[in-house]
Image: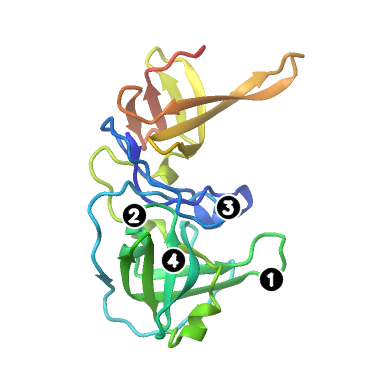
Amino acid sequence: MSAHDAKSAVEANDASESGAPAAANSAATGGAGKAAARGAPSFGAFVRKPARESAAKAAPATGSLRAETEASWPADAVEVGAVIDAYGLKGWLKVAPHAQDGRALLSAKRWWLLKGREGQGHRERHSAVRESAKVHGDSVVGQLSGLADRDAALRLRGARVYVSRAEFPAPATDEYYWVDLIGLDVANEAGVELGKVADLIDNGAQSVLRVTYASTDKDGKPAAGERLIPFVGVFVKTVDLAAKRIVVDWEADY
């Protein structure tokens, strides 16, 4: 199983904003989405890179850059990229997607923009209708309503881009968004509980489940244990999102 759309590793204090990242394919192939984020993004969503997407057009809509608050921010917002520059002279944004594939950016009708981080003073929140977007090299460039010129776009440089999880494109059969795997229980085929998915790691060849569990240290004190399980078909046997459970071919003493 390899990775599908949307990077950001959701920071614990941003969990309500980011919802956490990405999908995986049960075929035993590599090609996990590379983290295109500039800096240290929080966990959001990744998508395995398939065919190149063409320009995406949103349904005609009117509007402008809208100020948002924490209360108006969608509960299922997932961080999918970061604004790294303006593009052209007409208010387009250049976004580094948290994946090789910016599919979520291309499909969402509204982008949610957060500038500033927790504990670093004022945080600006905005949203706008995506009027157009397309892949441009390793980036996604998009035109949002309310951004009329380059100066307006430059003011958003450094903002993190979120989209609603409900606007993610439907994954293919046996593909899963990383954000949907976080928190699932993991057990082996013998029924031994191995822990919960804390997050996923992209090692460049495949996605890896980081599974944590209660343990003890050498002094017998409580400590967190960790298992790293490649998210590929030879090890991952079933993923049941409804039951919040993953079954793997993996022994407890590995």
Whether label 2 touches label 3, CB < 8 Å: no
**SS type, badge 4:** strand
Mark 1 or 4, closer to the camera:
4
Q: Which mark is residue 95?
A: 4
**Quadrant in the rendering for residue 169:** bottom left
Amino acid type at image mark 3: Ala
- State the residue position of label 1: 122
**SS type, badge 2:** loop
Amino acid type at image mark 1: His
From the image, which quarter does the N terminus lie in? top left
Q: Is residue 19 above or below residue 135?
A: above
Graded by Cα atoms within 10 Å as few (under 14), some (14 to 19) or many (20 or more), the crowding at tag 3 reads: few
- The CA span between labels 2 and 1 is 31 Å
Q: Which sits earlier in the primary sequence, circle 2 or circle 1?
A: 2
**SS type, badge 3:** loop
- State the residue position of label 3: 40
- The CA span between labels 2 and 3 is 18 Å
Amino acid type at image mark 2: Asp
What residue do we see at 67% from left, 59% from top? 118
Q: Which sits earlier in the primary sequence, circle 1 or circle 3?
A: 3
Q: Which sits earlier in the primary sequence, circle 4 or circle 2?
A: 4
Residue found farthest to the bottom: 148
Residue 58: x percent and y percent?
28, 73
- State the residue position of label 2: 101
Residue 172: x percent and y percent?
24, 45
Residue 227: x percent and y percent?
52, 24
- The CA span between labels 4 and 2 is 12 Å
Mark 1 or 3, closer to the camera:
3
Amino acid type at image mark 4: Val
Q: Is residue 130 above or below residue 89?
A: above
Residue 80 falls left or right of residue 17: left
What residue do we see at 37% from left, 70% from top? 141
